[in-house]
Image (tube, rainbow, N blue to C red):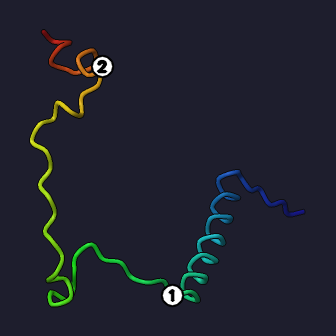
Amino acid sequence: MSTTHLTIHDLLRITYTYEMRALEAQARMQPRPRSDSACSMPETCAHLSPPTPSSPEHAILETDFTQMYCRKSRRA
């Protein structure tokens, strides 16, 4: 008599394999618009303004817990 022993790992691997194949097939059937972060045609993007530089002051990002959890204050 032959028995088949499947572990949870085996079952999950089989499930994820079939799920990934289904998602790949669905992605091939439904082409989605491409959105790149860089402009591939400079003449099209010439009217766009350059990104604004980020704020040099990091103090606006600090919270009440910053001093409590930062490494410098623990070592001091």
Callout 2: SS: loop
Left or right of 47 in this view: 19: right
Residue 34 lies, in percent from the top left, at: 39, 82
Q: Are marks 2 and 1 in contact (CB under 8 Å)?
A: no
Q: Secondary structure at mark 1?
A: loop
Using a 10 Å C-alpha cutoff, classify the residue at mark 1 as few (fewer than 14 neighbours), some (14 to 19) or many (20 or more). Answer: few
Q: Residue furthest left?
A: 56
Residue at x 59%, y 71% (from the top left corner): 20
5, 50: nearer the viewer: 50
Indicate the quadrant where residue 66 lies: top left
Q: Which residue is mark 2?
A: 64
Callout 2, which amino acid? Asp
Of the image marks 2 and 1, the number of the one nearer the N terminus:
1
Q: Quadrant of the C terminus?
A: top left
Residue depth check, mark 2 versus mark 1: number of the one nearer the observer: 2
Q: How many marks?
A: 2
Label 2 Cα neighbours within 10 Å, binned few <14 / some 14-19 / many ≥20: few
Type of amino acid under label 1: Pro
Quadrant of the drawing holding the N terminus? bottom right
Q: Residue at x 11, y 37 (%)?
A: 57
Q: Which mark is residue 31?
A: 1
Q: What percent of the width, then of the height, locates residue 37?
A: 27, 72
Percent of width and height locating residue 18: 66, 72
Vertical position of residue 54 compared to residue 39: above or below? above
Viewer-proximal residue among 18 and 7: 18
Q: Residue at x 18, y 76 (%)?
A: 48
To which quarter of the image does residue 41 belong?
bottom left
Q: Position of residue 26 (x, y in %)?
A: 61, 82
